[in-house]
Amino acid sequence: MSGARPGRAGEQLLAPPGPLLAGLAVSRQLADAVGFPVTSTHVASYLVDLPGSVVAPRIDRDGWPLTVHLVLAHEQGIGPGSPLLVYDARRARPRRVRVQPSHAVVIHASGTLHGWGQPSGDECRTMTAIDTRPA
């Protein structure tokens, strides 16, 4: 792997969300999208998924009840790119959600099994996850 891209495969950094993400976490648009007012927990996760990294399916714990995944950049290389995988007990296979750069998806992360498909080829995804909870 060349040194052209920052971070290591699957690297995650927990930090305060900063003013832009903190504003998104308590925005009226987010409250309208989820159907109820939300408040920030003042934690964000910054992630770099490089080729070969794995974000295994999981249920988030430790204060991540409602997570906003915002894809900042996604270099897909060949093919459609790896999706967000959302598992549902009523379906035999996970729902594959393609999240484009500058788009977000909200997950009830403390109650939904979810993960990201493994990047293939030279695919690279940079994103942030903002922790929120019902107000």
Image (spheres, rainbow, N blue to C red):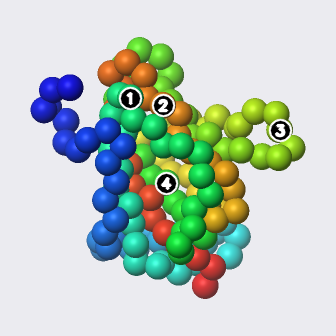
Please state the horizontal and vertical placement of residue 77, each as a whole percent of the image: 36, 19
Q: Quadrant of residue 33?
A: bottom right
Q: CB of mark 1 within 8 Å of CB of mark 2?
A: yes
Distance in Å between CA atoms under marks 1 and 3? 27 Å
- Number of the label disc, if any, that sits on residue 118: 2
- Check the image and name the residue furthest to the top: 78
| First in sequence: mark 1 vs mark 2 | 1
Viewer-side label of 3, 4:
3
- Classify 10 Å Cα crowding around label 2: few (below 14), some (14-19), many (20 and above): many
Q: Residue at x 60, y 52 (%)?
A: 58
**In the rendered structure, which amino acid carries the disc numbered 3?**
Arg
| Horizontal side, residue 55 vs residue 10: left or right | right
- Classify 10 Å Cα crowding around label 4: few (below 14), some (14-19), many (20 and above): many
Residue toward you, 111 or 104: 111
| First in sequence: mark 1 vs mark 4 | 1
Please state the horizontal and vertical placement of residue 49, each as a whole percent of the image: 37, 39
Q: Residue under circle 4?
A: 69
Q: Residue under circle 3?
A: 91
Q: CB of mark 1 within 8 Å of CB of mark 4?
A: no
**In the rendered structure, which amino acid carries the disc numbered 2?**
Gln
